[in-house]
Every structure is written in structure tokens, then in C-alpha cells.
Image (tube, rainbow, N blue to C red):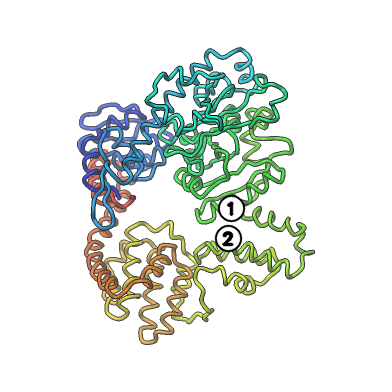
């Protein structure tokens, strides 16, 4: 966790005006600055920046925050990534606070990795300069090849495309001190006989950019006219950078920096499999598109996407390999809550060729003419293909086996409405009852328990389960529910009632959070004298609880007596903290409503300043680490 000292120093030394001016044209208006909001489309400036408070607020979309939140929202960074990026700009060593309270700085822990990454990124940047200059001097056959693939000058510049000739990188760099970095980055290799050679030769070069536009790796594609015919089929079509401290293909999406603004506007991202597929769609105006870098979609990719989009459309070939890749993607998106669908391209087409064939009509084709399959539906159908593709002709034993295969993935979901929905769909698809399906899944289930009949007093628990959606609970609400659950598990008689009597706390909760709180109250109030019934009621509550609650239950059950005593003290401290945070959140909500409704400009300015001040105290910098 990054230390508060580091965060304070970065905030004090970073000019929010200078930072935002790199992306937004700001005009001085007295004590503030005004510009067009980078987070939504507008023609009249409504984006306000206050240098004295080091904060910003948009009257159009209500985006607001400080230097960290600006970078997080604009570049899709986590809080830690935003802090580290600003620290690098200011040459501030990042200090980290460990769980035992000790601190580590740039001399240990994560900081050396960040320093190494900066050094490697600089070497990559110099290598790109070489590839770009080599393209300008490339033989005509190279430029003809690029033009034939639809890569005009604008696209070449947008994606920083280059060319690697037959050697020359080390001569261009002329720096022995970076030779080890060139090997680490995979730009140089050594043969079995000890000969050093350059990895990328006679290839089109596609630099891979991080969200902050650092060069973290390269992809290289062969240029057929430059290859000897007898070697053409023996040479890998694509070469990619190896895993480095800078580059991990499971965490990187090609084209994301160029696509991010459009993804945010559309709230939709198209995912393809190749560099040229991204660029080809870009050419015809479909700019909200990214590609994996020679790997299947991963949960880390899904996390990146979720920061900017709510809808994902997977564009895959219609052959078996394409269908299999789409089926595998289901698992990566399983718990994200994103709307994920698969679009299979016409036989013989890829996204690049589709763009060439349909031109400006490509977006309309993607949005309305190609059939879209929910990714789960495709995943299930793909598995059924292994058994002949016709569920009615599959034996009962085979359906049981298929159900277990599906269960190995689906039981990774916490109990809740999504899992219930998928269970119902799978049971219907496999011609099984939901009870039989749950029986078959019991061995995979993260929370094994015997079924109990719901008592009338547990109606609130049932309501919470039907309306669950933990992603909509903010941190303060999760904190509050954590206290209730800890009280229930540790202090079964005294502590819960003391909390539940604090009605003013609940006033700061959303309807969804209140549903969980009421469910917990039922567990406490209705079963206080009967431990067996308490456990049954608790299990019923947990079946609709968010993941953080399930993890908390596991944590508490593993605690020894010393740890339990420590937690009791923490719970009391947490109550004191909530006494401040929840009313403050309530006031923030009230201010936003009044800002949106008032037409008095001076009053609006006054309210915005109040909101900014509250946000600065409410958004503790350590929460997102």
C-alpha cells in the first residue's frame, strides 16, 4: 500500500492545471480555469478546474476529483498506477506501507521494478525511433505492401508503425550500456552457437503501447515480398516481445490507448485477434476496437475493459478455432457484470478484410446485421458440440457429465442472482431439473450446505438475494455491512443490536445496501436463541451476499481467540469512523442534486466548491490501493 506521505507529496507538487492542460485546452477565468470536458462530448465548456484546491468539476457529467482521479478516469488506471505515474513525472521515490506498518521505499519492494520499467521503456522508445526512421528509408516494396494493406500515412502515424530492416538497430543506438536491456526486451537474441542477432528483421513493426502511451513491447509481421519463397512457410508470420518487467501479454490490449476515448463514448468495445484487424476497423471509423497480443482473453483483460466499457463484442472467425476462442472467453468475463456477446464473421472473412469489403458500412454491419450470441449461450453450445451438438440425442449419463463440466466454471460465481439465472438456463438447456443440477455441482460449490426451508421471518433475506448486485455497493456501504456481519459472527448477542439501533447509519445507505442490512437483522433478531437456526438463516443470507462478504466469513472462521479480540476493537473504531463517513456521503448526494437543479450561477459555484471540499476529505487516497 502506498504511504500517505508519498500521496501528500505528489498532490502538493503536481499542478492540476498543468496536468489537465496536456489533454484539455483550458482558459483562465479569474481564480479558475474552464475547458471542454474530456469525459463526455460537449460544445460549450462546462469543465472547471480550481488550482487553489487542486481539483476539477464538470457541470455536464458531474465528473470531479483531484490529480489522481483525473488520470484514473482518463487513462483507465488503478489508483496505484496513477500514483506511480505521477511520481515518475516528478522523480519522487514511492514509499509503500506494509501490513505490519513498516515502510519500504525506492530502495526495496516494488520501487526497483518501477525504476527498471522506466529504463526499459526508454530503450524501447529509442528502438521505435530506429524502426520509424527505417520505414521512412525503406525500399518501395515495403511502402507498397503497407498501401496494399490499407495503411495510409495517417494510420501509420496514429499507430506509430515502423519497419525493421536486415540489421542495424545496435549500430543506430550505438550504446554498449544498454545491451543487457536489449536482451531483456527481446530486441537482441543469442543463437545456440553464441551469435548475437536482432530479433526483428525484414518485418513491419507494430509498437505496443501502455495506457500512458509508453512503448512496452513490439510485434513484427513478415513482408512476403521480402521473403525467399522457400522460407515463407517456414517463418513465423508474427513475432512478439517476450514477457518483461514492462510487458505482460495477459495484461495488455493492443490499440487501447488509441481506442480509449471512443470506447468511453460508445460504452462498447470490439475485441479482435490481430494488429491489422484493429487498424483495418480504425480505417473505416470503428475506433472502439482492441486486440489481444498473441494470447487468449484473460481476466486481467476483462478488468481493463470494464474500466471504460459496459458492452463487449468479440469478433472471431467462424471456424472451429474461432468458436473455441470465443467459448474460452466466457470464463474471463464470468464475474465482471459486462454485457458480452460474440459476433462470428462470414466464412473466409477477418475484421480487416470485412472493413475492406464494407467500408463505411462496417459499423452498421457489426451493430445490426451480424447475429450476436450471448457469450454464455455460445459457451454452452460449444460444449454440447463435443457430444454431437444435439441435446435430445445425448444420453442421460452424457448430460450429467456435461453438467459437471459446466459446473467447474459456473460454481466459481458467488451465490446470487447471476448464478441462479445461469443455473436455470443450464438446467433448461440440458433437460435437467435445477435440483438435480445443484446436486451434480455440490462437489464444486464454494459453500457446501444442506438445503433449508425458508422461514417467513427470512423474507428480507430472500429479497436481498433477489436484488443483489454487490458492484453497486460503495466502500462505505461495504464497510458498514462488514461491521454488521462481524458483529453477528463474533458478538452474537451484544454487538449487533447496538449497531442496528443506530438508525441514522442506515439513512446513508442505498436501497440495495439496506436490503442486505435488513437481511442480517432478520438473522440476528429471529434466531438469537437457537444456534442451529441462526446458522441456517445465515446460510440463506450468504446465498445472496457479494463476494467480499463470503471472503469475510472465511476470514472470521479461521481466526484464533487473539485475532477475534483484536477485531472487536477494530469494530468499535469502525463505528466511530462510520459516524463521520456516512453522513458525509449523504451530504455529497444532496449537493449533487442541488447543483443539477439550481439555475443561479453564483449559488452553483458555491455548491461546487462545497462538493469538491467534501470529496477531497471523503475520497481517502488509500482506499483504492
Q: From the image, tell me which residue sits under label 1.
A: 330
Q: Where does the image place residue 426, in percent across and percent down from the top left? A: 64, 64
Is residue 136 among the parts visible in the rendering?
A: yes
- Determine which quarter of the picture holds residue 512: bottom left
Residues 346 and 291: in front is 291
Is residue 285 among the parts visible in the rendering?
A: no
Residues 547 and 496: in front is 547
In this view, 244 is above or below 618:
above
**SS for tag 1?**
helix
Query: Which residue is drawn at the image coordinates 53% and 48% (left, top)?
Result: 298
- Residue 128 falls left or right of residue 604: right
Q: From the image, tell me which residue sits under label 2.
A: 409
Residues 145 and 171: in front is 171
**SS for tag 2?**
helix
Q: Where does the image place residue 12, in percent across and percent down from the top left? A: 21, 38
- Residue 377 falls left or right of residue 386: left
Query: Which residue is drawn at the image coordinates 39% and 86% (left, top)?
Result: 530
- Determine which quarter of the picture holds residue 141: top right
Q: CA distance from mark 2 to mark 1?
A: 9 Å
Amino acid at each position: 500500500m502506498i504511504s500517505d506521505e508519498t500521496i501528500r507529496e505528489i498532490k502538493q507538487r503536481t499542478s492540476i492545471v498543468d496536468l489537465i492542460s496536456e489533454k484539455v485546452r483550458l482558459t483562465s477565468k479569474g481564480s479558475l480555469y474552464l475547458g471542454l470536458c474530456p469525459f463526455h462530448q460537449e460544445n460549450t465548456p462546462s469543465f472547471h478546474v480550481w488550482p487553489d484546491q487542486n481539483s476539477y468539476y464538470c457541470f455536464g457529467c458531474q465528473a470531479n476529483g483531484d490529480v489522481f482521479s483525473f488520470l484514473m478516469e482518463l487513462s483507465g488506471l488503478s489508483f496505484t498506477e496513477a500514483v506511480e505515474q505521477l511520481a515518475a513525472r516528478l522523480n519522487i521515490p514511492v514509499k509503500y506501507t506494509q501490513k505490519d506498518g513498516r515502510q519500504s521505499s525506492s530502495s526495496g519492494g516494488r520501487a526497483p521494478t518501477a525504476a527498471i520499467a522506466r529504463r526499459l521503456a526508454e530503450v524501447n522508445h529509442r528502438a521505435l525511433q530506429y524502426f520509424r526512421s527505417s520505414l521512412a528509408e525503406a525500399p518501395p516494396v515495403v511502402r507498397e505492401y503497407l498501401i496494399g494493406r490499407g495503411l495510409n500515412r495517417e494510420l501509420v502515424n496514429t499507430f506509430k508503425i515502423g519497419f525493421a530492416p536486415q540489421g542495424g538497430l545496435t549500430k543506430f543506438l550505438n550504446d554498449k550500456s544498454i545491451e543487457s536491456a536489449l536482451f531483456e526486451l527481446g530486441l537482441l537474441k543469442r543463437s545456440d552457437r553464441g551469435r548475437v542477432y536482432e530479433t526483428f528483421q525484414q518485418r513491419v513493426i507494430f509498437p505496443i503501447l501502455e495506457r500512458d502511451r509508453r512503448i512496452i513491447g513490439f510485434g513484427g509481421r513478415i513482408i512476403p515480398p521480402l521473403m525467399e519463397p522457400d522460407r515463407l512457410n517456414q517463418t513465423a508470420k508474427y513475432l512478439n516481445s517476450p514477457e518483461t518487467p514492462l510487458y505482460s501479454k495477459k495484461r495488455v490490449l493492443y490499440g487501447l490507448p488509441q481506442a480509449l476515448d471512443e470506447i468511453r463514448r460508445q460504452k462498447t468495445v470490439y475485441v479482435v485477434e490481430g494488429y491489422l484487424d484493429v487498424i483495418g476497423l480504425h480505417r473505416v471509423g470503428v475506433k472502439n476496437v482492441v486486440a489481444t497480443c498473441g494470447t487468449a482473453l484473460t481476466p486481467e483483460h476483462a478488468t481493463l475493459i470494464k474500466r471504460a466499457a459496459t458492452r463487449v463484442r468479440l469478433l472471431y472467425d467462424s471456424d472451429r478455432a474461432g468458436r473455441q476462442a470465443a467459448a474460452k472467453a466466457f470464463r474471463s468475463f464470468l464475474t465482471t457484470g459486462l454485457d458480452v456477446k460474440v459476433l462470428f464473421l462470414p466464412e473466409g472473412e477477418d475484421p480487416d478484410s470485412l472493413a475492406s469489403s464494407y467500408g463505411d458500412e462496417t459499423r452498421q454491419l457489426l451493430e445490426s446485421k451480424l447475429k450476436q450470441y450471448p457469450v454464455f449461450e455460445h459457451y454452452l453450445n460449444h460444449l454440447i458440440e463435443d457430444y454431437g451438438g444435439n441435446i435430445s440425442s445425448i444420453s442421460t449419463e452424457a448430460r450429467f457429465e456435461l453438467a459437471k463440466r459446466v459446473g467447474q466454471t459456473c460454481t466459481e460465481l458467488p451465490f446470487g442472482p447471476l448464478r441462479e439465472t445461469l443455473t436455470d438456463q443450464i438446467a433448461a438447456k440440458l433437460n435437467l431439473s435445477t435440483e438435480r443440477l445443484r446436486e451434480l455441482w455440490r462437489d464444486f460449490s464454494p459453500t457446501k450446505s444442506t438445503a433449508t426451508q425458508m422461514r417467513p421471518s427470512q423474507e428480507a433475506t430472500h429479497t436481498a438475494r433477489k436484488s443483489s448486485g454487490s458492484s453497486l455497493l460503495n466502500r462505505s456501504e461495504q464497510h458498514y455491512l462488514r461491521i454488521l456481519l462481524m458483529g453477528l459472527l463474533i458478538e452474537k448477542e451484544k454487538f449487533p443490536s447496538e449497531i442496528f439501533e443506530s438508525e441514522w447509519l442506515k439513512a446513508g445507505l442505498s436501497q440495495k445496501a439496506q436490503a442486505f442490512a435488513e437481511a442480517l437483522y432478520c438473522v440476528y433478531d429471529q434466531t438469537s436463541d437457537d444456534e442451529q437456526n441462526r446458522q441456517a438463516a445465515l446460510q440463506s443470507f450468504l446465498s445472496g451476499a457479494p463476494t467480499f462478504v463470503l471472503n469475510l466469513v472465511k476470514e472470521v472462521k479461521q481466526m484464533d481467540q487473539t485475532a477475534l479480540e483484536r477485531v472487536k476493537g477494530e469494530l468499535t473504531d469502525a463505528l466511530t469512523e462510520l459516524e463521520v463517513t456516512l453522513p458525509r456521503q449523504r451530504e455529497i448526494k444532496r449537493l449533487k442534486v442541488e447543483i443539477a437543479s439550481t439555475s443561479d450561477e453564483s449559488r452553483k459555484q458555491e455548491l461546487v466548491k462545497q462538493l469538491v471540499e467534501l470529496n477531497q476529505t471523503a475520497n481517502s487516497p488509500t482506499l483504492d490501493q
